[in-house]
Image (cartoon, helix red, strand yellow):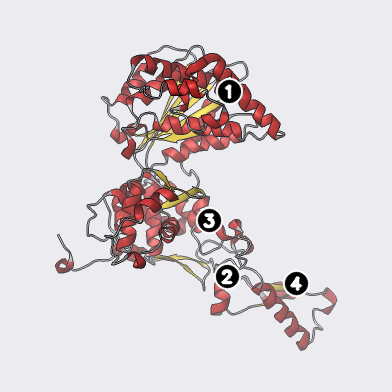
Amino acid sequence: TFSASMIMLPANTTKTTTKQERKEAQLSTKADHDDGIISTDKIHHDDSSTMGKSSVGSTEATEQSDFSVRKPTIQDEFKSKIVQPTNTLKKNKNVEEFTVNKLRFNSVGLLGRANEIRTLQACLDRTLEPNRRTKEIIMISGYSGTGKSALALEMNKKVNSAKRRAAFVAGKFNQYRSGEPLSAISEAFGKLCHKCMLLDDANERVKSSICEKISGALRSELKNEVHLLTRIIPNLNEMMTINAHDAAACDNINTTNSKARQAGLHFAIRVFIRIMSSYFSPLIICLDDLQWADALSLEIIELLLSDAQNGNSLMIIGCYRSNEVDGTHILSRTLRHLTDTGDESLYLTQINLGNLREKEVNQVIMALLSIDDDSRTKGLASICHKRTMGNPFFLLEFIKVLEKEGLLFFHLGLFQWKWNESNIEANTSSTKNVVHLLQVKMKKLPLEAQGFLQCAACLGSSFTLETMLSIWKHQTMFGTRSAASKRSTDELLDTMVKEEYLETPEIGNYRWAHDNVQQAAGRHDWKHQTMFGTRSAASKRS
């Protein structure tokens, strides 16, 4: 039973309404229900053990009220209207997100990271102080899946709320492109140029004016060597016109091998950041997965932070996996150099993210299930913490699998989430890490879909539709007898997005939902084991 609908009647007719009038009123109310959905913001219930009870008032309350209460029955057709958005033409995202039978992942946020968020805010406040020019480097470390990238992106929200012309740009190093120098820096600088062209000023003339000023400043400082930047910065050619004669003169020169050219490149990058940080205050550059950074990129980071000629505020946020960076790693050496500079304007802040405690895991589950009573989810939280060790990404993936396996489900009759802790204990087991859990999940996909994920994993952390089309059309080994029987690339990509393996930041562009997802997809030695359910020893292959 769920909250009943109520019909407002005039006070002077409450006791004299005829049978026919009551029938017409009920039919009118049913029509109102058929026109919409019931979502969490329309249902008033107690999230404790009494959640889901009818909200029909007592006899005394009914006598004192001017409301006539109707208690409808839930039929199959009406159930579908409760749990699915009916207005599919409008694509109301907010309605879909708050449908009551969906796990509310958007409500989780950064639970359990209050201290770390305050630390970020303190760093940002220093860069925003008037007449103070600081260099900030924030290093966020932790195991994979602890939320390092999510915490770094929190700075973007804070910058946007600062109501000033600031810029937050991000780049990501890739495990499979570690031999490509400056990949993440190139990505971040390209986004910065793109931001210049999309500044939300009064009109197009002003936007063009800002790009012209930046282009003029770059050419004034770098002269003919401005073309060095176009080799590593996407979109710079769109911002400014590069002299074709100057560029052609150096077509055959490798800018990273020649010492002279490398020195020129270092100078060009420093000038680029000086000019950009004069237009954006503060300028924040986030570089993710520094454990895979090349030596040249780390050298550039050190040069930018130690540039005494840059009188503008600059912040660099770096994220790396602490278990993959030891004392001999080149990143550790770079951090030691920065610490030993003795520059009073340089602030080095280190944040180490650990796993969530059981109490914080309980808060995450309460947010996912829209439950206010922490005692009701305490047992489930204990199991989830034991299975995932409180790793945030692992935890969310584990809960997704619980729902998919039917161990956690939404009960339509009670209008609440239900689970059996004994069943979860009996049908799940601890796994080595989240990659193993994802592998188990991926093994349940059709063979063709598994091969599709493996191919996509080889393309890096992001790829385009065109690239995937050109590769996948040549594959004939993944469970298909002919090209005609193969699912289209678009279909497979849509499936992977729906399964939350991939994301679509822009039309035609795809990226992995997390590094661990790409890592799980790229491994070819998937174990023939199952985390949910058991099979006989005879049927299990070695």
Distance, label 2 to label 4, CA atoms, is: 27 Å
Q: Considering only order in the chain, which callout, 4 or 3, is on the residue closer to the N terminus?
A: 4
- At numbered mark 4, what does the secondary structure look like: helix, strand or loop? loop
Eye-nearest disc, 3 or 1: 1
Label 2 sits on residue: 82
Q: Is residue 291 above or below residue 492?
A: above
Distance, label 2 to label 1, CA atoms, is: 56 Å
Q: Which mark is residue 65?
A: 4
Q: Residue furthest right?
A: 12
Label 1 sits on residue: 215
Q: Considering only order in the chain, which callout, 1 or 3, is on the residue closer to the N terminus?
A: 1
Q: Amino acid at mark 2?
A: Ile
Label 3 sits on residue: 372
Distance, label 3 to label 1, CA atoms, is: 55 Å
Eye-nearest disc, 2 or 1: 1
- At numbered mark 3, what does the secondary structure look like: helix, strand or loop? loop
- At numbered mark 2, what does the secondary structure look like: helix, strand or loop? helix
